[in-house]
Amino acid sequence: MDPRYTGEMLRHLEKQNEHLMDAYRSMSHELHKLQVEEEMLMRKFYELMSAQSPARKNEEESSTLPDDGRNGQSSALIPACNNEPIGQSSASLIPVCSDEPIGQSCALTPVSGNEQ
């Protein structure tokens, strides 16, 4: 490199450094603005979701009910402790449907094989 151009090269590099620092400051400022905007939007989103939470819980509770409208009731045949297939047993048991909540005992009624 020719020593005649070192002063000119130094001025060019200093000017380039100045432009890069301006770009850095500008980008940092823009990043900060975007972070503040993101935080504000996240707070609004949280407020919106927490306001809708009770409505969602009610909707989820109503959607867990069976399609026939009976809450947890069963009408399936249950065989009486033997290895015969359902419907061919001489004394199968079927649950009697009631309005009792899930988990409580359900009365079983014996039914003869020809009534099924």
Image (cartoon, helix red, strand yellow):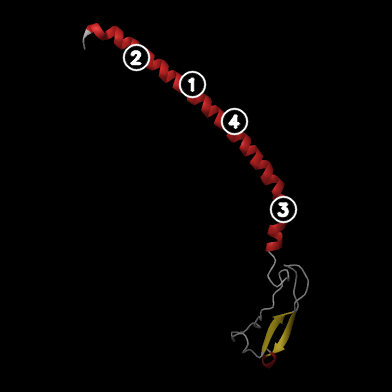
Spatial distance from mark 2 to mark 4, Cα to Cα? 35 Å
Report x, y in % for residue 108.
Answer: 73, 80
Neighbourhood count class around disc 2 (C-alpha, 10 Å): few under 14, some 14–19, many 20 upward = few
> Which quadrant would the N terminus be assigned to in this image?
top left
Residue 55 is labelled as 3
Image quadrant where residue 96 sits? bottom right
Write the residue at 30% across / 7% down.
7
> Looking at the picture, which amino acid does disc 4 mark?
Val
Label located before the other in sequence (3 or 1): 1
The C terminus, quarter of image: bottom right
Instruction: Report the Cα–Cα distance between label 3 and label 1.
Output: 46 Å
Q: Which residue is mark 1?
A: 25
Whether pointer 1 and pointer 4 mark residues with C-beta atoms closer than 8 Å, the reply is: no
Would you name the residue on which mark 2 appears? 13
* Residue 4: percent from left, percent from top: 23, 6
- Residue 26 lies, with reference to residue 112, above or below; the image says above
- Checking the image for residue 60, the label placed there is none
In the figure, is residue 113 to the left or right of 13? right
Of label 2 and label 3, which has the lower sequence position?
2
Q: Position of residue 64 (x, y in %)?
A: 68, 63
Circles 3 and 4 in contact, beta carbons < 8 Å: no
**In this picture, is 109 found above or below 56?**
below
Q: Mark 4 highlights which residue?
A: 36
Mark positioned earlier in the residue sequence (3 or 4): 4
